[in-house]
Image (tube, rainbow, N blue to C red):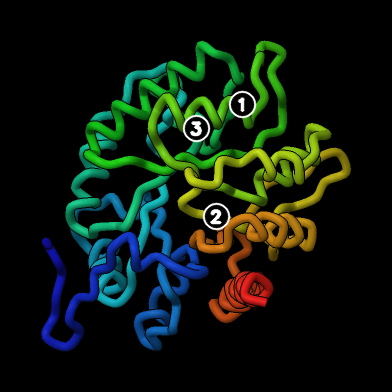
Amino acid sequence: MNSITSPDHPSRYGTTSDIKGTGLGLRGVHIPEILAQLPDIPWFEILADNHRAGGGFIPRQLEAIRQHYPITFHCVGMSLASPDVLDMTYLRDLKRQIRDFEPAWVSDHLSFSQLEGHHYHDLLPIPYTEESLFYVSRRIREVQDILEQRILVENVSSYVEFNESSLSEMEFIHGLLSEADCELLLDINNVYVNCQNHDHDAATYLESIPLTRVREIHLAGFEAFPDYLLDAHNNPVSSAVWDLFRQFVERRDDIPVLIEWDNNIPEFSRLREEANKADRILARQRRTQVA
């Protein structure tokens, strides 16, 4: 194992089995506090795109975090559904990061963010058709071959539906998991946002999730506007999303959970409160099963 060590803090690089309970998305503003106090957090999710530098302060910070905590990588730059060719520079950098920091797994989104060489700062949705299903599946297989591992693909929030779509979102995801042989990062906040925006039933959506393919759950907050919900990651998890989370863990309660909060980032202690709430829900469900 290519580990990073120091005389004072021996490395405790984790494996997939170390990713349990409710973790937090690592944000730069919290890193000094985390390194000074080493709080009892089971794992951190790293936005890999923010740590692409080959040297300097940012990777040194990640090295320090990695000495104490298991991590996963979350990405926004694979552009899995883009009509552009795969960005081999991005994927080579990501593979180097995987080699250097050994995340338990790597994830990205069922979307595209690059078109004709232009990078957008959004995760753009696609029409759900047989053609796009096989196209995106082939690209995911190519990425997995390059990275030499399965990846997790996250369901994204959306604000439009396409007339061209011949499949539902869940039919598309079922087909994708099979054709690409990848795994699912289930974002329950995105499920709720989409179902509210497009007048679908979130409970029915969750009941159709293929449980054996879900490796991670995301929980986050949205912002409500008069005509739609925005997946803004700038608020606490809503009561409606907590209710959906409770519903889902009645079917399976051993999936690692991640609290996302990317805008209007609060104090680290506030993030821990959200994580503790998720842990209490999981613990209550397990007590119910034992009883």
Query: Which residue lies under the disc numbered 2?
Result: 217
Image quadrant holding the C terminus, namely bottom right
On the image, the x and y values in percent for residue 27 come to 46, 65
Side of 204 relative to 254 (left or right): right
Task: Find out whether the residues at labels 2 and 3 contact each other: C-beta distance under 8 Å.
Answer: no
Q: Three-letter amino acid code at disc 1? A: Glu
Q: Which residue occupies the foreground of this view, 173 or 36?
A: 173
Query: Which residue lies under the disc numbered 1?
Result: 171
Query: Which residue lies under the disc numbered 3?
Result: 120
Q: Residue sitting at 76 percent across and 39 percent down?
A: 195
In front: label 3 or label 1: 1
Q: Reading the chain from its start, which is encountered first: label 1 or label 2?
A: 1
Q: Is residue 238 above or below residue 42?
A: above
Gap between marks 3 and 1 measured at Cα: 27 Å
Side of 192 relative to 89 (left or right): right
Q: Residues within 10 Å of mark 1 (few under 14, many from 20)?
A: some
Kindly tell me whether residue 234 is visible in this rendering: no
Helix, strand or loop at label 3? It is: strand
